[in-house]
Image (tube, rainbow, N blue to C red):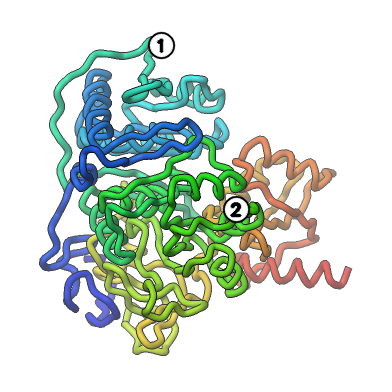
Amino acid sequence: MTDGADQPVTRGIGATSGEGPAAARGGLADGYRSEALSELLAAGEPARPALIVPDGGQVITYAQAAAAVDVLARRLAGLGARRGDRVALALPNGPDIVLLLLAITALGAAAAPLNPAYTQAEFEFFLTDIAPRLMLIPATGSAAASAAAAGTGTTLLGVREASAGPPDLLADGQPSVLQRPFEPGEPDDVALVLHTSGTTSRPKQVPLRQRNLMASVRTIAAHYELSQDDVSFSVMPLFHIHGLVASTFAALSAGGAVIAPRRFTPMRFWRQAREHGATWLSAGPTLHQMILDKADDGGAPSTLRFVRSCSSALSPALQDRAEREYGAPMLQAYGMTEASHQMSSNPLPPADRKSGSVGVPTGTLIGIADKTGNLQPDGTPGEVVIRGPGVMSGYVGNPEATAAAFFGEWFRTGDRGVVRDGYLFLEGRIKEMIIRGGENIAPAEVEDVLMSHPAVQDAVCFGVADEKYGELVGAAVTLAGDVQTADLIDHCRHRLAAFKVPASIDVLQEIPRTPTGKVQRRRVGEFVAQHRGQG
């Protein structure tokens, strides 16, 4: 229980099992069967495809995938990985990262996938925070990751694609063949370590246990009625919870196949989806728009039975366009890292899918709380709070953040919403996170980079509405010296991943603050917009 937190009454919509509350924060609901990730590949028939690699013509069956995971786990054990360790990965999409993630969790270790586009400084932060036993990068190398690993004393392994069987693991440029037996992972082992950022604090480590992930995986598979006849087209980055849990693990848990391209482009999607009989795909609105913009003359695959959108708000116009051009129902869902991804989703036809709603609860109990943690009746807006077996127990080494994130056993999402007739509608974010094309960006991180420039006296970042990406990063600064805004953007570009770099920077005489000295980022954004309009 959260120390000092008021206890909200047990009332909400949806449930993890029946209508009862979860047994404990992030714990199991009554009647829920705790599972390990090793159950994933056991669901498929040995000879059926598990992973389809369209840009290499490779098909990996369930039997081959299971054998590859076992070999990789033994090799990782031979390289020193043990139960309870962390193993970082900075790898591109494709079958290799899927097999390696499952191999790491088979050991009872925790996988920590990182964005390969990070800069050296960003890698250094995450490696210091995670303290992994090993880090896996492409055998072709990554200058930023290699430099960061050297600076933090992290052991690097290269991953090289193999023509058959599992990928090679290279230590000092040579394939590692030593294999050792390992103690298999269990449901309560931490399987995945991801980071989520607040607007005023450093990124927080989210530990997701094998049982958390399997609860979410089973929920998604059941909600969309996935079976061995389904083929998921995995288009989202696999260092994010969305692509990993929904597009990949949920599909495998049902015995279906996953199209896992090594080099995805929206233009290639249409031909590859038709060729391999994709029955569904999940992506953020920005990526859906990019895919639709690259539609070819062949049209949508006739096999598509639904399309899913998650990671940021889906506009009614894009939903209408998607349903028209994909030729399938578009189902908007709601997920977050701390909940092992999905919390709610619009249902499949013939049930109603309501435009502007993120749907009904799926595997979670959802409530709307006031500022003191008391749950509100339907139709009353407030903060969205959740309970269920997919929810984490707390942030790593950050009891203050954990306490602030819970009302008793209810996790606070930081989003404002309202429930109407059993459907959840989101009204905006209480937390001031910027979400650009599904990528979460902490304003404080960008502000710190801007403030590191000697000519910048003060800085504030905020989201700027954008039709394509949902939001772009905007910034306002006050200056202590002469500098061009283009130079400040270039300063950020060398220290931040491209999606975090401000699209625009305005120079102000003074940044507006409250009487107590706090900055309200959204209001600063509005002030800047007004300032431009008057200029």
Q: Amino acid at mark 2?
A: Gly
Count of numbered circles on the image:
2
Mark 2 vs 1, N-terminal side: 1
Between residues 350 and 12, which one lies in front from this camera angle?
350
In the rendered view, tell whether residue 348 sits above or below residue 188: below
Q: Quadrant of the C terminus?
A: bottom right
Between residues 375 and 190, which one lies in front from this camera angle?
190
Nearer the camera: disc 2 or disc 1: 2
Measured as percent of width and height from the top left, residue 248 is found at 36, 48
| Residue 153 seen in render | no
Residue labelled with disc 2: 298
In the rendered view, tell whether residue 470 sits above or below residue 81: below
Residue drawn at x 30%, y 66% as measured from the top left: 223
Measured as percent of width and height from the top left, residue 143 is found at 56, 23
Residue labelled with disc 1: 172
In the rendered view, tell whether residue 446 sits above or below residue 386: above
In the rendered view, tell whether residue 101 sits above or below residue 514: above
Measured as percent of width and height from the top left, residue 387 is found at 27, 68
Q: Which image quarter: residue 443? A: bottom right
Mark pair 2, 1: CA separation: 47 Å
| Residue 222 seen in render | yes
Residue lying at the far left of the rendered structure? 31
Between residues 529 and 295, which one lies in front from this camera angle?
295
Residue drawn at x 29%, y 59% as measured from the top left: 221
Q: Which image quarter: residue 346? A: bottom left
